[in-house]
Image (spheres, helix red, strand yellow):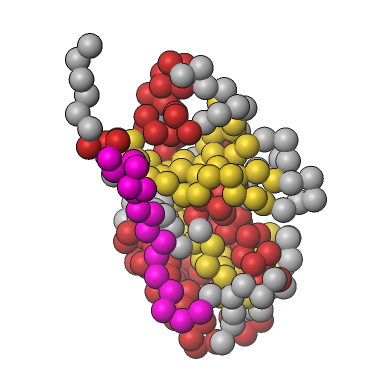
Amino acid sequence: MKLLAVETATGCQSVAVLDGTAVLARSDEETQGAHAKRLIPTIDRVLTSSGFTLADLEGLAVSIGPGSFTGLRVGLATMTGIRMVTGIPLAAVPTLEAMAWNLRDPDQVLCPILKARTGEVYWAQYRWTSAGHLTTIMEERVGPLELVARSLEGPTLVFGEGWQIYRDELRRLLDLREGDAREASREAMAASAVSVGLAGLARLARGDAAGQGLSPRYVQRAEAELNLCAVPSRRR
């Protein structure tokens, strides 16, 4: 399947064209909020590099969050617009799930981490089965760094923008809890349109195309986490 994939959940804009699992062309660049200005020209450039036009495509895939509100809205608006004009099926891929496609190792628990508001992150946990299926161990969450450290049990591979930003603090918290976390390779850190595309191909292959009224995926705090954060610390 020839597929166009877009990732705009972070400050890095990523666009790729795949033919099956083969990457024909890609662009990864820092935009820092300029997605609206750069995304469509980048799509045109990547399509030209791949030798395809929109008429040649058989699938679309877009990252739906969590992540940057502005970036996600630009990515979704652009890709749903392309779907409306062309009728090409669109796969909506959660950003953290897509990041798990950066590392297809069945022997590791994967914990992608993205920056949220100041001092907080989004995270989830996944594992690949020996049969090559991605399973969710922990659903997407948002909260302070302490909750991430509490959630990691056993050997875990950590990566992503949130890990890079808060690496020192998270390592300190994990040491206090004797957490067993390892840092993934630098190549696996970034949210990538290639991974969005691979996850999108899997979704479209099982008939999981996005319906109408698609909106960004906003992760809400669990009630227990809200209560935990609201409890003032006590001096001992």
- The magenta span reads 211-227
Main secondary structure type of the part rendered in magenta = loop
Quarter holding residue 49? bottom right
Q: Is 212 colored magenta in this rendering?
A: yes
**Which residue is farthest right?**
131
Give me the residue at 35% from left, 53% from top. Answer: 220
Give me the residue at 48% from left, 33% from top. Answer: 151
Give me the residue at 51% from left, 58% from top. Answer: 94
Q: Position of residue 88 (x, y in %)?
A: 59, 82
Q: Is 147 colored magenta in this rendering?
A: no
Q: Which quadrant does the C terminus fall into?
A: top left
The relative height of residue 121 versus residue 152 in the rendered view (above or below) is: below
Front residue of this view, candidates 121 and 17? 121
The relative height of residue 222 versus residue 76 in the rendered view (above or below) is: above
Q: Position of residue 50 (x, y in %)?
A: 65, 68
Give me the residue at 41% from left, 21% from top. Answer: 173
Quarter holding residue 142? top left
The relative height of residue 64 versus residue 120 in the rendered view (above or below) is: below
> Can the viewer see residue 226 in this picture?
yes
Front residue of this view, candidates 76 and 203? 203
> Can the viewer see residue 82 in this picture?
no
Q: Position of residue 164 (x, y in %)?
A: 44, 33
Q: Is residue 87 left or right of residue 233?
A: right
Q: Position of residue 204 (x, y in %)?
A: 65, 72
Front residue of this view, candidates 66 and 235? 235
The relative height of residue 96 versus residue 21 in the rendered view (above or below) is: above
Q: Which quadrant does the N terminus fall into?
A: bottom right
**Which residue is farthest top?**
236
